[in-house]
Image (cartoon, helix red, strand yellow):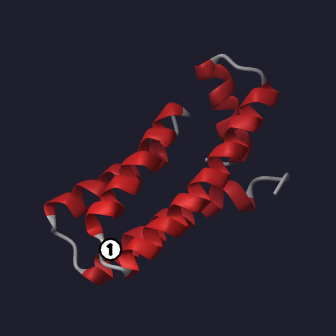
Amino acid sequence: MNWQELKDKIVAELKVSKEKAEQLLSNYKKEAEKELVKIRQKLEEQDLPKVEELLAKLKEKTKELKIEEIEEKIANFGDKLKRKTLTKEEIDQKLLELEKKLTSIFNKNNPNT
């Protein structure tokens, strides 16, 4: 899914204007980038409860915009963290996958970035 597809989906599902959808996505992009920086920092500090909290916050914001594809990645990552079934390398890999997914949507396909 790319920026335009997400914007169209938000317009259709949230019943907002294209301008409002653009604004919502732009705000989400900024917030997601900040959250990912915080998540990476907390992982370096090995503060997994805080990482879980930050992931839950990001998941809620993602859910509000009905971006299921990313919401699922975040939920999967958060669930595995809670169950403590991931090694440090797997945690790093999951975060990298999430960052790549967001980047592919927000940078590569967004003409306004």
For label 1, the crowd category at 10 Å Cα-Cα, with few meaning under 14, some 14 to 19 and many 20 or more, is: some
Q: Residue at x 14, y 60 (%)?
A: 83
Position of residue 3 measured from the top left corner of the image (x, y, whole percent): 71, 46
Position of residue 84 measured from the top left corner of the image (x, y, whole percent): 16, 67
**Quadrant of res 4:** top right
Q: Residue at x 73, y 62 (%)?
A: 108
**Quadrant of res 14:** top right
**Quadrant of res 10:** top right
Most extreme residue toward the right, as rendered?
Answer: 112
**Could you tell me the amino acid type at mark 1?**
Ile
> Helix or strand or loop: what does disc 1 sit on?
helix
Q: As displayed, is residue 28 above or below residue 37?
A: above
Query: Which residue was labeled with disc 1?
Result: 91
Q: Residue at x 19, y 58 (%)?
A: 82
Q: Is residue 86 left or right of residue 45?
A: left
Give the camera-side residue of 61 and 97: 61
Q: As displayed, is residue 37 above or below residue 64?
A: below
Position of residue 107 measured from the top left corner of the image (x, y, whole percent): 72, 61
Q: Is residue 17 left or right of residue 93?
A: right
Position of residue 89 measured from the top left corner of the image (x, y, whole percent): 31, 83
Q: Quadrant of the C terminus?
A: bottom right
Q: Is residue 65 left or right of residue 111?
A: left
Q: Is residue 55 left or right of residue 79?
A: right
